[in-house]
Amino acid sequence: MSRAEALPEAAAGAARTPGLLWTFGLFRSELATTFRRWRTIALLGVLAAVPVLVGIAVKIETGDGSSPGGGPGGGGGEGPAFIAQITNNGLFLVFTALAATLPFFLPMAVGVIAGDAIAGEANAGTLRYLLVAPAGRTRLLLTKYATTMTFCVVATLVVAASALAVGASLFPLGDLTTISGTRISFAEGLFRALLIALAVAASLIGIAALGLFISTLTNSGIAAMATTVGLLITVQILDQIPQLDALHPYFFSHYWLSFADLMREPVYWDDLQRNFGLQALYAAVFGSAAWARFMAKDIAS
């Protein structure tokens, strides 16, 4: 083949090379496909319903003037103990709902989306067609992970928005008291609620990477989702066993409730930093494992 004949073919090959705009189009297509599925809509619906149920339960329990969770006056505190403050300020329903959904509901939803990312495509027979397009395995895997992380943010914000709407409709709003006992304005409370929602979303980075890795190991989306959720439950149980105390700091769920430290004055960053560092470590390890497995995965059968 002469040089003159080779140039047009090289130009055609360069034209087929995906650029940034093409990558964004692939990401947008993945987002549209994920959020149009009835399974995704159902998961978001369940997450949105949790704050409604918590808010109604607190409203009914405190209808006689008592404090939720026990004796009169209740006490503030971390995690679910925020529930004692909901009747004083509906914004606390946001913190309570996030604390209630983070141990299981949110990571389970993320596990379903991540577990189905690759295995679901393989089971449906669409994975090979995705790779026929000039996506490349690395680009496709990164797009799937970015889509899963987007779902993490959306799911967390759905819980927070639902809780804020229910809290505003059932309870008073206004200045609030932090865990440290200081008073902050409602505007600052809203800002901290947003930070907490983002911190909760970041806490799901590890389970998302783990689910994506499992998704590359099988061609069954149901098996990948079940395995991811099963590992989530197992880790949660192991994290409660005192004899495994030395291993607890290495479990991806160990520092999840550290988001409560954002409600301190000043903010206590130590456990938050440990949480973010641990999630980054899980993302690096299982993300690399997912890439290595996916690059060698047989998609012809």
Image (tube, rainbow, N blue to C red):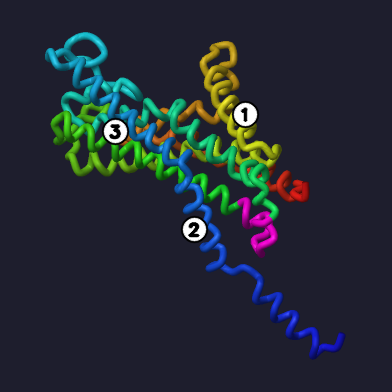
Residue 228: x, y in percent? 59, 31
Which of pointers 2 and 3 lies earlier in the amino acid sequence? 2
Q: Which residues are magenta?
A: 129-141
From the image, tell me which residue sits under label 2: 28
Alpha-carbon span between mark 3 and mark 1: 30 Å
Residue 94 image label: 3
Q: Quadrant of the N terminus?
A: bottom right
Query: Would you say residue 285 is visible in this rendering?
Result: no
Residue 227 image label: 1
Residue type at tag 2: Arg
Residue 233 appears in which quarter of the rendering? top right
Residue 118: x, y in percent? 63, 45
- Horizontally, is 32 left or right of 225 in the view? left
Residue type at tag 3: Val
Residue at the location (42% across, 44% down)?
A: 153
Answer few, some or many: residues within 10 Å of disc 1's Cα (few below 14, many 20 plus, some between 14 and 19): some
Residue 252: x, y in percent? 54, 30
